[in-house]
Image (tube, rainbow, N blue to C red):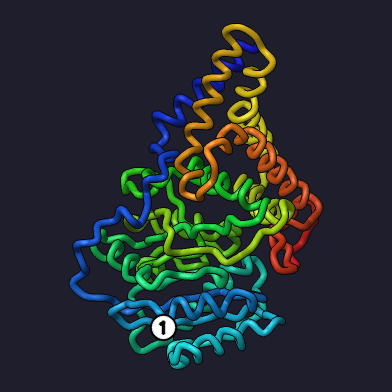
């Protein structure tokens, strides 16, 4: 049995290294995008920021956007989603400090309509607001309130969208990696995301794989409306990937890593990262117990079997398990380098994967208790056994 399990683990990692879009190389980055071709014209862009109790970060976000070196018309609509911490006031003060108060519109969000997830509801209101303009923008930059942007990011996004004829271009923000919990778990979060959605496949118009990173998404407004708008994904908790799937049916999309978009949100404790994962992990599995069981079994075989067999089996099984473990550690190296972490963390990936498996199981437990999709006091995932949205 040990030999069989070792061979299965070896085969899985051989496949992941050789036949899954080379996701592990982390080569799909904005720094490798062509920089020599500018669009014929720079389209008007409006950033839409859904914000709920984001006073701690929203000022830096707004300021970084207003300091973009973009050559076209650019403004911001901040949708204040019933905040109680002065989010709007902080955003306005940031705009004033940049001398650009006229480029910031603050929209007081309406109470969430039944059947809508909170963020998607706020994004829809922002979309409606910009549509009221006599000359609506051609491109919309959807971003989170806890994200800061380097001055050249908007130009890079528009250049990629216009020259590449993309209906959606997204950059995955570089997550904060300072606390002990962040250093241990954050690089793996991005690694697992790339494993699930290989960026090379996302960027291939012929492939069905679609994904985006919600902190930074530049969308073609007309393509979004043609795709059905946010009504077509109203209940989505994983709004970025839902938007990507919607948009890819209507044109090319692009997704990459970046160092120029950074997340300001801190996760000082392991439980904070666990809560972040648990908020949407079970939604990713369509709230299916069968899929949950399959994912749990798959993670055990993929990440835990190899080191266990390598350490406790003997002869050929132990050797094959060790090779699979080495494959795993090597695959993790590019992401560790991207986040400035030590090479030795590659050997710890099985333990990190076990933590993420625990977070996923917690996500299902919270859903069954009627507390799924918990964010800023809202439980947004409906439990078939009777849980309700808050």
Looking at the picture, how far across and down is residue 3, in whole percent? 60, 11
Looking at the picture, how far across and down is residue 213, in whole percent? 49, 58
Q: Which corner quadrant of the image does residue 178 belong to?
A: bottom right
Q: Residue at x 52, y 75 (%)?
A: 61
Count of numbered marks: 1
Q: What quarter of the picture does the C terminus occupy?
A: bottom right
Q: Secondary structure at mark 1?
A: strand
Looking at the picture, how far across and down is residue 79, in whole percent? 56, 80
Q: Is residue 115 shown left or right of residue 147? A: right
Q: Is residue 122 visible?
A: yes
- Residue 71 higher or lower than 283, as above or below: below
- Residue 5 higher or lower than 294, as above or below: above
Q: Residue at x 59, y 68 (%)?
A: 119
Q: Is residue 34 shown left or right of residue 354? A: left
Of residue 310 and residue 198, the one placed in the foreground of this image is: 310
- Residue 115 higher or lower than 65, as above or below: above
Of residue 304 and residue 333, the one placed in the foreground of this image is: 333
Q: Is residue 345 shown left or right of residue 194? A: right
Q: Which corner quadrant of the image does residue 192 belong to?
A: top right
In this view, the residue farthest toward the top is 315
Q: Is residue 290 visible?
A: no
Q: Residue at x 46, y 64 (%)?
A: 261
* Crowd rating for badge 1 (residues with CA inside 10 Å; few <14, some 14–19, many 20+): many
Q: Is residue 73 shown left or right of residue 261? A: left
Q: Which residue is mark 1?
A: 75
Q: What quarter of the picture does the N terminus occupy?
A: top right
Q: Residue at x 45, y 27 (%)?
A: 15
- Residue 135 higher or lower than 139, as above or below: below
Looking at the picture, how far across and down is residue 198, in whole percent? 43, 43
């Amino acid at each position: 049995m040990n030999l069989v399990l070792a061979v299965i683990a070896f085969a899985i990692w051989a496949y992941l290294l050789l036949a899954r879009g080379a996701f592990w190389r982390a080569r799909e980055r904005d720094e490798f995008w062509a920089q020599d071709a500018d669009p014929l014209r720079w389209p008007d862009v409006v950033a839409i920021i859904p914000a709920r109790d984001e006073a701690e970060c929203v000022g830096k976000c707004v300021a970084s956007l207003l300091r973009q070196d973009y050559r076209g018309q650019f403004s911001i609509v901040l949708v204040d989603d019933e905040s109680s911490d002065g989010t709007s006031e902080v955003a306005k003060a940031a705009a004033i400090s940049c001398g650009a108060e006229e480029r910031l519109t603050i929209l007081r969000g309406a109470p969430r309509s039944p059947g809508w997830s909170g963020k998607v509801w706020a994004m829809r209101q922002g979309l409606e607001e910009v549509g009221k303009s006599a000359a609506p923008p051609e491109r919309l930059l959807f971003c989170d309130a806890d994200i800061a942007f380097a001055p050249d990011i908007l130009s890079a996004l528009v250049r990629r969208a216009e020259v590449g004829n993309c209906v959606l271009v997204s950059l995955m923000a570089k997550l904060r990696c300072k606390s002990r919990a962040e250093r241990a778990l954050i690089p793996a979060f991005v690694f697992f995301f790339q494993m699930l959605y290989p960026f090379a496949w996302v960027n291939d118009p012929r492939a069905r794989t679609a994904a985006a990173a919600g902190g930074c998404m530049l969308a073609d407004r007309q393509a979004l409306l043609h795709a059905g708008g946010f009504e077509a994904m109203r209940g989505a908790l994983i709004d970025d990937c839902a938007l990507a799937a919607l948009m890819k049916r209507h044109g090319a999309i692009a997704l990459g890593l970046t160092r120029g978009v950074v997340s300001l949100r801190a996760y000082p404790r392991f439980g904070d990262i666990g809560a972040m994962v648990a908020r949407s992990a079970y939604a990713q599995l369509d709230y299916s117990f069968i899929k949950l069981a399959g994912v749990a079994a798959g993670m055990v075989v993929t990440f835990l079997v190899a080191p266990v067999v390598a350490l406790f089996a003997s002869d050929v099984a132990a050797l094959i398990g060790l090779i699979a473990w080495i494959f795993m550690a090597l695959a993790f190296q590019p992401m560790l380098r991207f986040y400035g972490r030590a090479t030795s963390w590659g050997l710890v990936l099985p333990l990190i994967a076990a933590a993420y498996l625990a977070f996923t199981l917690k996500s299902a437990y919270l859903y069954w208790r009627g507390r799924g999709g918990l964010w800023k006091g809202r439980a947004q995932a409906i439990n078939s056994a009777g849980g309700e949205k808050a």
